Amino acid sequence: MTVTPDRPTPNAAAEPAVIDRFIEANRAYAVDFRDGGMDARPVQKVTVVACMDARLDLFAALGLELGDAHLIRNAGGVVTDDTIRSLTISQRALGTRSIALIHHTGCGLLGLTEDFRRDLELEVGQRPTWAVESFVDLDGDVRQSMQRVRTSPFIPHRDDVRGFVFDVHTGLLREIH
């Protein structure tokens, strides 16, 4: 079950570890950082649920600025119990009203099966408590995610829930109805 990266792994002795680079970058960022006095409530009153895929630059793709939206990301951008938890807090405590669900072409969950959990159990001796939530039909999974949001009793604002598939080759969103 070892995952082989598409790119070679950097030589750890030759360059700093990635998290050490984060710390260096943060120090440089903090030099010019000024607290803009933003509220935790998103300006556009929207939450975006999307895949964690590193190819998705949601700020650029959606024209967002810092403070505009809540972004919830997970493998596949699927609506899980934890996603419902975050959406509930986003709406009930922080004032959001709209929800955009974004899946994408070339997703790593496409075609993955629940055998992944079985393999993990064989490897580590314990079955994960979570479901993989893999899918074979992007559009169908977006519809399922929209349905999960629209039927949740915890989410009060369900009239503006829209789903999309982001094409990683063109950068375009395609709305799913």
Image (cartoon, rainbow, N blue to C red):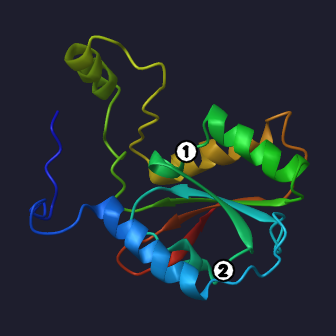
Q: Is residue 167 left or right of residue 16?
A: right
The tag on residue 64 is 2
166 vs 106, left or right, is right
The answer, for residue 55, to whether it is visible in the render is no
Query: Pointer 2 and pointer 1: residues touching (CB < 8 Å)?
Result: no
Percent x, y of residue 49: 62, 56
Q: Is residue 41 above or below residue 137?
A: below
Location of residue 102 (image quadrant): bottom right
Calculate the distance from the C-alpha at mark 2 to the C-alpha at mark 1.
Answer: 21 Å
Residue 78 marker:
1
Amino acid at pointer 2: Leu
Closer to the N terminus: mark 2 or mark 1? 2
Residue 66, percent from left and from top: 68, 77
Task: Identify residue type, mark 1.
Answer: Val
Snapshot quadrant of residue 43 = bottom right
- Tell me where residue 144 appears, x and y as whole percent: 61, 42
Residue 21 visible, this angle: yes
Mark 1 neighbour class, 10 Å CA radius: few under 14, some 14 to 19, many 20 or more: many
Label 1: state its secondary structure.
Answer: loop
Side (left or right) of 31 relative to 81: left
Looking at the rendered image, the quarter that the C terminus falls into is: bottom right
Residue 124 % position (x, y): 25, 17
Q: Residue at x 58, y 63 (%)?
A: 164
Residue in view at x 81 percent, y 63 percent: 40
Residue found at the far bottom of this picture: 32
Q: Is residue 119 above or below residue 31?
A: above
The relative height of residue 155 versus residue 127 in the rendered view (above or below) is: below
Residue at point 79%, 35% (across, down): 152
Q: Is residue 92 above or below residue 22?
A: above
- Single out the residue that lies furthest toward the top: 125
Residues 135 and 33: in front is: 33
